[in-house]
């Protein structure tokens, strides 16, 4: 008998004993929180219906799943902690988010779903890139990196230091 998996949209807060088949669509660099006490790493997971969920790992779980949750790979994830997204978060994907920790079961699936993943991107042309400059909407661009500038340490509005690195991209023109 084939196993049944729930789609992201069918998983609710306080729900238990569920499994979802997802692709790691985005995986961000681990960061330190404003209070300097917690490390976190965000990622975006997508299911085969195109539903997305923001997912977070904290502290030692970042290291524990470092070589497991790889961009564009498919996984069966069971019983992550599901909670409501903080409405103050600018980058929230939807009303819920998952937290993966030591109690979460993560199993790799030997499927190549990259074609599906790439079909979910909506590429913005360089010609209209300036229309997106002063908003917080995420966009997708396609280009070739021709120069990587040196890393710089900058001061954030929370009096933390942050490392940034600028890239020079070109498109087909």
Image: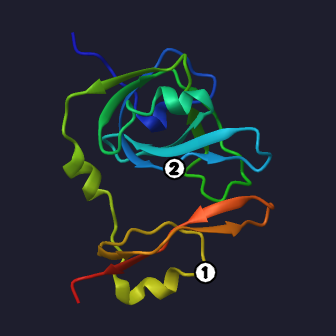
Percent x, y of residue 111: 19, 33
Q: Nearer the viewer, residue 140 or 84?
A: 140
Identify the residue shown where x is 23% and y is 90%: 173
Extreme-top residue of the structure: 1
Give left or right: position of 44 versus 48.
right
Residue 72, picture quadrant: top left
Label 2 packing within 10 angstroms: few (<14), some (14-19), many (20+): few
Identify the residue shown where x is 41% and y is 87%: 128
Kindly identify which numbered label has been placed on residue 134: 1
Quadrant showing the N terminus = top left
Q: Nearer the viewer, residue 40 or 75?
A: 40
Residues at badges 1 and 2 in contact (C-beta under 8 Å)? no
Disc 1 is placed on an element classified as loop
Identify the residue shown where x is 27% and y is 82%: 171
Label 1 packing within 10 angstroms: few (<14), some (14-19), many (20+): few
Q: Nearer the viewer, residue 22 or 73?
A: 73
Percent x, y of residue 169: 35, 78
Disc 2 is placed on an element classified as loop
Kindly identify which numbered label has been placed on residue 29: 2
Residue 109, picture quadrant: top left
């Amino acid at each position: 008998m084939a196993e049944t998996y729930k789609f992201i949209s069918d998983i609710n807060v306080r729900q238990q004993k569920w499994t979802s088949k997802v692709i790691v669509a985005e995986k961000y660099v681990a960061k330190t929180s404003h209070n300097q006490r917690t490390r976190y790493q965000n990622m975006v997971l997508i299911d085969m219906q195109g539903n997305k969920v923001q997912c977070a790992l904290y502290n030692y779980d970042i290291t524990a799943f470092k070589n497991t949750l790889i961009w564009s790979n498919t996984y069966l994830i069971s019983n992550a902690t599901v909670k409501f997204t903080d409405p103050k978060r600018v980058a929230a994907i939807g009303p819920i988010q998952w937290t993966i920790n030591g109690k979460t079961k993560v199993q790799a699936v030997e499927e190549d779903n990259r074609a599906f993943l790439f079909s979910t991107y909506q590429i913005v042309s360089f010609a209209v890139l300036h229309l997106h400059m002063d908003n917080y909407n995420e966009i997708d661009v396609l280009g070739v990196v021709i120069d990587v500038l040196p890393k710089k340490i900058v001061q954030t509005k929370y009096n933390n230091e942050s490392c940034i690195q600028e890239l020079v991209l070109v498109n087909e023109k």
